Image (cartoon, rainbow, N blue to C red):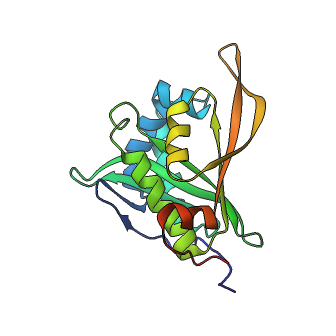
Amino acid sequence: MPPTPSFAVKPTLVGQRVLLRPVAADDAVGLVEMLNDPEVRRLTGTRRQARPGTELERAEQWYSSRSADENRLDLAIVERHTNSYVGETVLNELDADNRSCSFRIALVGPRAFGRGYGTEATRLILSHAFGTVGMHRVALEVFAFNPRARHVYEQVGFVHEGTKRQALHWQGDWIDAHIMAVLAEDWSAHCGYPTSGK
């Protein structure tokens, strides 16, 4: 039996286009940009816009505190060529007994969309979750008005498990949320190599 999963270790994961590294206070400017982008807020169902004057300080405090949390892993997505912050990816809601957690990812907006950053970042963090941490299940929710994200998730091995009907009320419309998950055996079959979580 592998060790109990934990996110105490905050790795740096290197891909071709991006690298994932622990978030830091210096990334707060990018986080504020992301939180204030109307398209990012729509796709994530985030109503609250960061407030001028306090948002940067709050973002710095949030990112500075992430290294101490052993039950979640917050990694900045950094474009390798420019060394610029283009988003974040998070493993959270750790259920160590059942070797499961939730996953989410957000990019800063149109300047980062359609460049393959999200797909590569997702593959990198799933490889870490299954191959290093020993997770058995990683789950997410994606809103029905975000088919681009759902397509990416399906490409990397997530399977649609169900729908939370009318889970989000957005600008007068009710939006479904799709529940998706990838299991260790799904990931192994998708990638062609074994995982450590049994």
In this view of the protein, can residue 33 be seen by the observer? yes
Q: Check the picture and name the quadrant holding the C terminus.
A: bottom right
Q: Residue 32, how many percent across, how many down?
A: 44, 38
Q: Is residue 146 above or below residue 95?
A: above
> Along the horizontal axis of the image, is 177 left or right of 18?
right
Q: Residue 14, how many percent across, how many down?
A: 34, 64
Say which of 55 and 154 sits in front: 154
Q: Is residue 50 above or below residue 162?
A: above
Q: What residue do we see at 49% from left, 38% from top?
A: 55
Q: What residue do we see at 22% from left, 49% from top?
A: 82
Name the image quarter holding residue 182.
bottom right
Q: Is residue 124 above or below residue 96?
A: above
Q: Check the picture and name the quadrant holding the N terminus.
A: bottom right
> Along the horizontal axis of the image, is 187 left or right of 172?
left
> Along the horizontal axis of the image, is 5 left or right of 114?
right
Say which of 109 and 58 sits in front: 109
Q: Residue furthest bottom?
A: 1
Q: Residue furthest top?
A: 172
Q: Is residue 171 above or below residue 32?
A: above
Q: Residue furthest left?
A: 81
Q: What residue do we see at 43% from left, 54% from top?
A: 121
Q: Residue 78, how many percent across, how many down?
A: 34, 53
Q: Residue 101, how many percent across, how many down?
A: 67, 60
In this view of the protein, can residue 28 be seen by the observer? no
Q: What residue do we see at 57% from left, 69% from top?
A: 130
Say which of 5 and 157 sits in front: 157
